[in-house]
Image (cartoon, grey):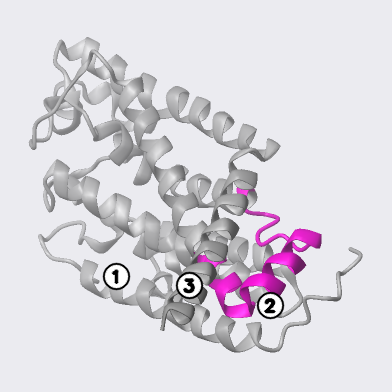
Amino acid sequence: MECKKEKTQGRHGVIWHVVRNEYARWICNPRMILFLGMMIFIETYVAEGMIARSEKMGKPFGMFEIFIATANSTELCMVIPAVYLLLIGDFPRRDGNTLLYVHRAGRYHWLLGQILTTAFSILTYLGALLAGCVLMGAGRCVSVNQWSDVVTKYQTLFPEDIGSSMSGMITERLYNHFSPYQAFGYSVSLLFGLLFFLAMLKLLFFLLGKPTAGVAAGGCLLGFGWLFGILEWKWKWIFPLSHAIEWQHCDEVFRFMTVSLAQSYVYFMGLSLGTVFVSIILAGRYNFGMIERR
């Protein structure tokens, strides 16, 4: 009995060793400069506009409103998942260490380690994005579960700015349906669902022996989803991007949802579980000993 317990703990230890090493290599990847570039773009495109509106009205905005505006921006809704896809461009790695991990832990424990690493990387990515957005508004924002006048009344008071980039980020389709805390919670969880599915899709293609095709497939899903969302075609609900954007669920005129948030959560859960299930099957057949030279 003790022998089995020690063996189980040893396996778990190897899994967490895989997670620690993969996560550390991901954090230290030089591609992280892309995240910094994205944050600079967010500050220029979103935060500065929000701050300018706040100063013009002489009123503060909500602590999470920069993040909510970022997550629901027509442009940035593409940028956030695209940058994450680039940051995991070499995930999972296939080198001598991979062969060692698979040999010591077994194929399925290695696979579990990759899935856990993905979850931690997404939480880190979204956490850093949130922290950056909050810091951008430091000193000018307040923590209340109520939409600020900067969001709800600015266009009425200053109609000459109605065509600005900020005007299309937090609209009536968002603040008439959700409170700020609700919008924040849905933004984080739906983005997590989107990023996790994209990572699992990439993992699946890796096990199919087509690692670069996983990035291409994710990019195509994002691109078509963004295009169909802009055109407001019903086909947009086939693609994951529309499910990750809150205002896409809401009718433009009436206070009802064309697709419920519950349906979007089921959508992401179903796709993610489906890709994980197929990956488990493929992991048993994958030849880790043959390393592609491309």
Judging from the image, what secondary structure is the residue with disc 3 in?
A: helix
Q: Amino acid at mark 1?
A: Tyr
Q: Amino acid at mark 2?
A: Leu
Residue closest to the eye, 161 or 151: 151
Residue under the point 8% across and 35% down = 146
Label pair 3/1, CB-CB below 8 angstroms? no
- In the shown orientation, is residue 179 left or right of residue 222? left
- In the shown orientation, is residue 214 left or right of residue 64? right
Q: Nearer the viewer, mark 2 or mark 3?
A: 3
Q: Estimate how packed mark 1 is, as few (under 14), some (14 to 19) or many (20 or more) residues with alpha carbons within 10 Å.
A: some
Splitting the image into 4 quarters, where does residue 147 fall? Answer: top left
Dot placed on the residue nearer the N-terminal end, 3 or 1: 3
Label pair 2/1, CB-CB below 8 angstroms? no
Q: Amino acid at mark 3?
A: Glu
Dot placed on the residue nearer the N-terminal end, 2 or 3: 3
Q: Nearer the viewer, mark 3 or mark 1?
A: 3
Residue at the disc numbered 3? 6
Residue under the point 20% across and 61% down = 251
Residue at the disc numbered 2? 207
How far from the left and from the top, in percent, is residue 263?
26, 75
How far from the left and from the top, in percent, is residue 31?
67, 39
Residue closest to the eye, 283 or 258: 283
Residue at the disc numbered 1? 265
Judging from the image, what secondary structure is the residue with disc 2 in?
A: helix
Residue lying furthest front: 2
When the figure is inspected, residue 131 is found, relative to residue 245, above or below; the finding is above
